[in-house]
Amino acid sequence: MDQDERLLHSSSFGAAAGAYAEHRPDYAQAAVRWALEPASGPRVLDLGAGTGKLTATLVALGAEVIAVEPDPAMLTVLRRSLPAVRALPGSAEAIPLPDSSVDAVLAGNAMHWFDMAVAGPEIARVLAPGGILAGLWNLMDDQVEWVAGLARVSGSAAIGPRDTPASWRAETADMHLPKTGVAARFGWPEQAEFPHGQRRTADSLVATIATRAGVLVMPEQEQEATLGRIRAFLASRPETARGEFTLPILTGVLRVRRR
C-alpha cells in the first residue's frame, strides 16, 4: 500500500465512527496485561485510539491513560463514552505530549497506519527510558473451519493477511521499523497471541466487517456485493444462521522496548 492509499484507508473511519464504536470488538485483557508487563510505570498513551476500544480496557486495568486520535468524529465518540479520560487530537507523527511523559505507548489496530520514519522518533520522544511500544490486533481465528470460509468469501480487502493468525506475525513483525533508512528506535520484537471472542449475530458480524477500511473505501456497488456475499455465507452456515454466536478471536500483540 503506497502513501496515498494508506492515507485514504486510515482517514475512512470517521464517517463510520458510530458503527465502529458499536460493532468493533474490545481487546483481551490478558493481551493488554502482557503488552504492559515490562513497563516501569502506569502512564500509558493509547495512540490512534479511535473510539476508545483499547482505552476502555486500559482504564479497566487501572492504567493512567491518555488517548490521542487524529479523526475528530472518532475523538468525539471516545470523549462521550469515556469522559474521565484525557483525550487529545493528534497523531503518531505529531504527539501532543512532552518528552518522557509516558511509560508505554499502545496502539489497537492502528500501528499499520503509522509512518514509522516520523512516528518512531515521536513515540521514542514521549516514552520514558526503556519504555514499551506495543501494537495489538484482533484476529479472526481461521483455524476454525467456518471462520476460514468466511475469510475466503469476504476477500482480502475485508479480511486480509494481517487479520488472521495464519499470517499476522509475518505481516506485523517489522511494523515498528521505519520503511526508509532512518535508524530504528526500538529493540527486538516479541509477539504473542491471546484467546478472545465477541458475541455476534449474522447481521452484527456483517456490520462489523463493514467498518473495516478496505470495505469503507470500496465503491458502493462493490461494497454491497461484498457484504451480500458475506451475509449469504453466514445464512448458509449452521454456526451462524440463527441467533447469537461467539466469533472466535485472538488478540495478537507485538511488543518492543525503546532503545
Image: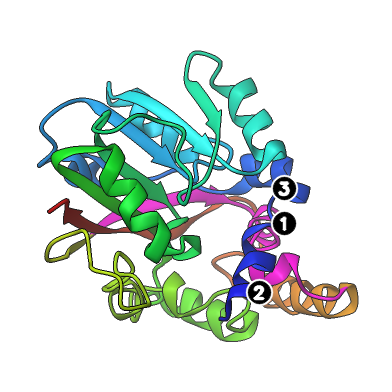
Which residue is located at x 90 percent, y 78 percent? 221
Secondary element at tag 1: helix
Identify the amino acid type marked 2.
Asp
Camera-side residue: 146 or 73? 73
Report the amino acid beneath label 3.
Answer: Gly
Find the residue positioned furthest to the front: 182
For numbered disc 3, what is the local secondary structure?
Answer: helix
Residue 35, image x, y percentages? 21, 46
Start-end of magenta stretch: 193-219
Residue drawn 30% across the image and 38% down it: 126
Give amino acid for label 1.
Answer: Asp
Between 117 and 79, the one lying in front of the other is 117
| Residue 28 makes an appearance in the image | no
Q: Is residue 160 left or right of residue 132?
A: right
Q: Percent position (x, y) of residue 204?
A: 67, 52
Distance CA(mark 1)–CA(mark 3): 21 Å
Q: Is residue 226 above or below residue 203?
A: below
Q: Going by the picture, which residue comes out furthest to the right? A: 221
Numbered label attached to residue 139: none
Report which residue position mark 1 lands on: 203
Identify the residue position indicated by label 3 in the image.
14
Question: Residue at label 2?
Answer: 4
The image quadrant where one finds the C terminus is bottom left
Q: Residue at x 34, y 31 (%)?
A: 58
**Mark 2 touches mark 3? (CB < 8 Å):** no
Q: Which of these two is toward me, 65 or 212?
A: 65
Residue 63 colored in magenta in the image:
no
Marks 2 and 3 sit apart, C-alpha to C-alpha, by 17 Å
The 10 Å Cα crowd at callout 2, few under 14, some 14 to 19, many 20 or more, is few
Q: Earlier in the sequence, mark 1 or mark 3?
A: 3
Q: Nearer the viewer, mark 1 or mark 2?
A: 2
Q: Secondary structure at mark 2?
A: helix
